[in-house]
Amino acid sequence: MTHHYRTRGTCSREITFDLTDGVVTNIRFLGGCNGNTQGVARLAEGRPAEELIRCLRGLDCNGRGTSCPDQLARAVEEALRK
């Protein structure tokens, strides 16, 4: 199932991804630092949702209290609750 998440506090504006049987795939960031978001998406591809949350939750970008990887973790958490 495809999920759409509007980010908060980051340069990226939205994250889309699929969550199937607890595995995250097809991750796309809209906006943000292109190279960094591509790298995060590629490293996260095909990983279990719970693993991504543990690895990415709480990462901070320049004192913003969040980051694109943190927003991905939050998006996956939200998708798991649904």
Image (cartoon, helix red, strand yellow):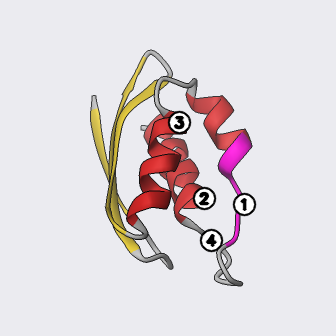
Q: Which residue is drawn at 70% across and 70% down?
A: 60
Q: Which mark is residue 70?
A: 2
Q: Mark 1 is on which residue type? A: Gly
Quadrant position of residue 1: top left
Query: Which of the marked residues, 3 or 4, is nearer the chain's N terminus?
Result: 3
Question: Residue at left 68%, top 77%?
Answer: 65
- Give, as a three-letter code, the residue at label 3: Ala
| Cα–Cα gap, marks 2 and 4 | 6 Å
Q: Give the range drawn in magenta.
A: 55-60
Q: Residue at x 60, y 58 (%)?
A: 70
For the stretch drawn in magenta, what is the main secondary structure?
loop
- How many tags in the picture? 4
Q: Which residue is identified by label 1?
A: 58
46 shown above or below 79: above
Classify the position of the C terminus by image quarter. top left
* 59 on left or right of 82: right
In the figure, residue 47 lies in which quadrant? top right
- Residue 40 lies, in percent from the top left, at 52, 48
Question: Do the residues under discs 2 and 4 have CB atoms within 8 angstroms?
Answer: yes
Label 4 sits on a secondary structure element that is loop
**Mark positioned earlier in the residue sequence (3 or 1):** 3
Distance between the Cα atoms at labels 3 and 4? 17 Å
Q: Which of marks 2 and 1 is nearer the N terminus?
A: 1
Label 1 CA crowd tier, 10 Å (few <14, some 14–19, many 20+): some
**Callout 2 touching callout 1 (CB < 8 Å):** yes
Eye-nearest disc, 3 or 1: 3
The residue labelled by disc 3 is 44
Q: Position of residue 72 (x, y in %)?
A: 51, 52
User: Which comes sooner in the sequence, label 4 or label 1?
Assistant: 1
State the CA–CA distance, disc 3 to disc 2. Answer: 12 Å
